[in-house]
Image (cartoon, rainbow, N blue to C red):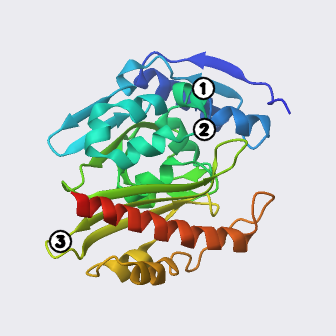
Amino acid sequence: MNPSQFAYQRAGSVDEALALLQEHGDGAKLIAGGHSLLPIMKLRLAEPETLVDIAQIHELRGVRRADSEITIGALTTHHQIATDPQIRSAVPLLGDTAARVGDRQVRNRGTVGGALAHADAAADYPAAILALDATIVARGPRGERRIPAREFFLDFLTTALQPDEILTEVRIAVPAEGHGWSYQKLANQASGYAIVGVGATVVLDGDGACNDIRVGITGAAAVAWRAEETETALRGQRLENGTVAAAADLVDGGIEFLDDLHGSAEYRRRVTRGLTRRAILEAARRARQG
């Protein structure tokens, strides 16, 4: 299916892009790499009247580290995130997740900002962004706004971004040295999208018990979520097979799983529990290795 007709504008700065969004109102959509927006336009899930191209806004690219925080520009590609030495060293969960997005073409053109802003239910990044407790930075006519990751994903293709705002960067507090991490994914073999994806970070105390844990789930439902019941059950516990398996069974409390040609709701529930257990155990193993 082809997308509906649209006009095209190119912005040279964030301020120019914001002005174009205000000028064209709800009929405008931002585009950069296009690998998140164009597929849903072809399905007529989005029918913008005007595309505002922000791909040439260089201030939105790149990775920076200041003290204990990593800042990633919204136009940084998946490939750049996957290969950036600062990310591989400080937040390897995000680097590993980026390396498993789509295929080589998608990773070289698609951007982290576009992937997050469109909030596709099967996108990889939400699991890592939630597990890293990241902050999404948006800029609009009312100034800059910081949105915690757990408040960002609202529903299918819906985020906390306002129509007149631009996602400018992602900020991640560098996890404690020696933390463990894992991204486990059941991929759609045709598209590479996540049928289920689970990201986990683990910090152990001096006695080997779980001091902190965060688990993010994507793909399984219309919106990504933090597995807070699982996290609560494991804090203060030793992360052994039986304990982790019991906590992983709590991952789906109150969640309505997707039911489609890629997998029934019950299948996704079972896979989510299994991948959650696997992600936590692997993260714990890495944390023990230091």
Give residue 258's quadrant in the image. bottom right
In the rendered structure, are the residues bearing label 2 and label 1 in contact, judged by CB atoms less than 8 Å apart?
yes
Q: Tell me the number on the disc at residue 145.
A: none
Q: Nearer the viewer, residue 143 or 274?
A: 274
Q: Is residue 209 visible?
A: yes
Q: Which residue is mark 2?
A: 102
User: What residue is shown at x 30% (from left), y 47% (from top)?
Assistant: 172
Residue 176 falls left or right of residue 54: left
Residue identifier under label 1:
105
Front in this rendered view, residue 216 or 118: 216
Going from the N terminus, do you reach mark 1 or mark 3 first? 1
Say what secondary structure mark 3 lies in: loop
What whole-number distance in Å separates the C-alpha atoms at marks 2 and 1? Answer: 8 Å
Point 46% across, 30% down: residue = 79
Query: Who's the residue at 66% across and 67% down the image?
Result: 268
Classify mark 2: residues with Cα within 10 Å, few (<14), some (14-19) or many (20+): many
Residue type, label 2: Gly
**Badge 1: how crowded within 10 Å, few (<14), some, or many (20+)?**
few
- Residue 123 position in % (x across, y down): 58, 48
